[in-house]
Image: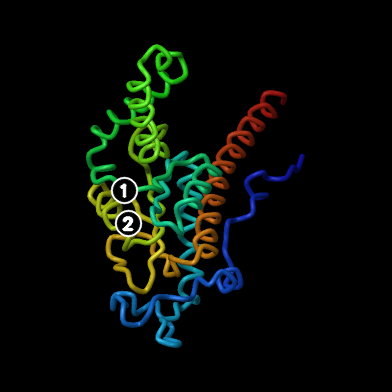
Amino acid sequence: MWRPNPIEDFKMATVSMRDMLKAGVHFGHQTRYWNPKMKPFIFGARNRVHIINLEKTVPMFNDALAELVKVGEKKGKVLFVGTKRAASEAVKEAAIASNQFYVNNRWLGGMLTNYKTVRQSIKRLKDLEAQSQDGTFDKLTKKEALMRTREMEKLEKSLGGIKDMGGLPDALFVIDADHEHIAVKEANNLGIPVYAVVDTNSDPDGVDFIIPGNDDAIRAVQLYLNAAADAVKEGRNQDVAAVAAEQDGFVEEAAE
């Protein structure tokens, strides 16, 4: 008996050139700030601003999304990184929407390469959260309670997005490779694949999946992040569908 294949029913996460044009992905930085390594991805210049060649960006981004789907299928952990103002809120939203992890305040040196120390800080954060819930804070002096509350808030700001990651991520999705160069370098040192939006002023070295595009316009940043979050979710759903289909097959065989 024929039945629809749940895996084939999923729509592949893709972004069109029209989407990118509307979001302003093609606008690079002023020509005087360019990085010559980005020359292959530049179409030309207009009013002393480099124009990014979307004929390159569209397939490169869609290839990156296809790989992120695979990460999701394997239940891999994706760490979204974007600490500048234009990206901060959107990075958090994308990570939460896809049940993943984020750093959107400040990249602390050693966040990946010195994860043992970071893990201790995460434990401290969780201990403080528990104390704030179980009444421990109420038994302290006002001053001590305030100090612990401030410590908890500070830790939450810098580590809240990774406190449940439980180990190193399987991929980094970065907004602005230049601004987040420390994160990129740490991932390189550990062999963690880097997916990154790289503008005309940035160095693409160290980025495994280059997405040439505007890294300042909020609409462009949201476009990248929403598509990446959708790709990870799609991969996770495919995995669930595959398991369901397999179980279905076993049930049918047993019935025969």
Point out residue 184 in the picture as x, y percentages from the top left corner. 30, 55
Q: Position of residue 91 (x, y in %)?
A: 47, 51
Q: Position of residue 215 (x, y in %)?
A: 43, 65
Residue 127 seen in the figure: no
Mark 1 belongs to which amino acid? Answer: Trp
Which residue occupies the extreme front position in the image? 142
Q: Could you tell me if the residues under marks 2 and 1 are in contact, i.e. CB atoms within 8 Å?
A: yes
Residue 159 occupies which quadrant of the picture? top left
Q: Residue furthest top?
A: 139
Q: Is residue 1 left or right of residue 227?
A: right
Residue bearing mark 2: 180
Instruction: Report the residue marked by disc 1.
Output: 107
Q: Which residue occupies 33% across, 27% down?
A: 147
Secondary structure state at the residue bearing disc 1: loop
User: Residue at (30%, 51%) from the top-left corner?
Assistant: 183
Q: Nearer the viewer, residue 23 or 124?
A: 124
Q: How many marks?
A: 2
Taking 186 as reference, is 58 above or below it? below
Q: Give the residue displayed 41% in from the left and 48% down from the top.
A: 104
Q: Give the left or right position of residue 251, taking residue 173 as reference.
A: right
In front of the other: 229 or 146: 146
Q: Is residue 128 above or below residue 18?
A: above
Q: Position of residue 38 (x, y in %)?
A: 33, 75
